[in-house]
Image: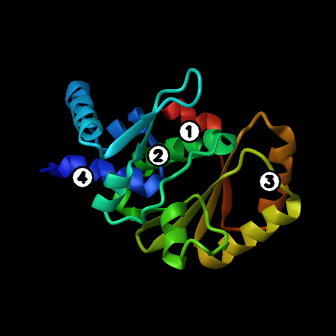
Amino acid sequence: MLQNDEIQILHLIGKWGFLLSRHLKDFLSYSSTRTFYRKIKRLLELGYLKREYLLYGVPPFYTLTHKGRIFIGLNKRSVKIRLDQVNHDILVLDTVLYVMRKEVVSMDSITSEKELHSKDGFGSRKHYPDFVIESNGQTFAYEIELSLKSESRLEENVQLNYINYDYQIWVIEKKNKKLRNIVETVLSTYHNASILYSCEVLKDD
């Protein structure tokens, strides 16, 4: 029988698709690294978790196995980690940790993009932020933007966020001057939009 914190690990990975060990450890506030890794080892041995080494120099990625997904009530389709957007997805998780510490919000108040899409059905192509926080009766949409597809697409997504959420925060790399200039220009006309630089997120980590 799985213990409550082990079940929580499965739900957290199901929420985001994958997690690195540092995200899991911090999300669950394990004070003992030894205890934490014992939990991970047990879930791996019981067949609920899968550990994948995908990128040189990057710690292993933890995903749910078929058994793990069924246990927490997710669909049977496994998550495929896309290497072309893995840096984006890791920064999403780092931003979640940053916001939880800085704004003192719990994981229960955060809805991932994956969860937002699942409410509409997986066939929906509607745009959603990378995650949304509900706090004190207000909604905060977080968008992590590392590469710009088109300025018109950015404008469209900013407008959607303006309509659907109280505030929107765009996380970008300060050193990417071209992207920064475009995002700053588009966001300047929306009173509910602001920029958070990734260097601030990572400095906190």
The residue beneath circle 1 is: 201
Q: Amino acid at mark 3?
A: Val
Secondary element under disc 4, as helix, strand or loop, is: helix
Q: Amino acid at mark 1?
A: Val
Is residue 104 in sight in this rendering?
Answer: no
Q: Which residue is mark 4?
A: 7
As drawn, the label of residue 183 is 3
Disc 1 and disc 2: Cα gap in Å?
19 Å
Dot 1: few (<14), some (14–19), or many (≥20) neighbours within 10 Å?
A: some
N-term-proximal mark, 2 vs 4? 4
Say which residue label 2 marks.
Answer: 18
Q: For the residues carrying marks 3 and 2, which lies nearer the camera in this image?
A: 2
- Circles 1 and 2: CB atoms closer than 8 Å: no
Gap between marks 1 and 4 measured at Cα: 28 Å
Q: How many marks?
A: 4
Crowd class of label 4 (few under 14; some 14 to 19; many from 20; radius 10 Å)? some
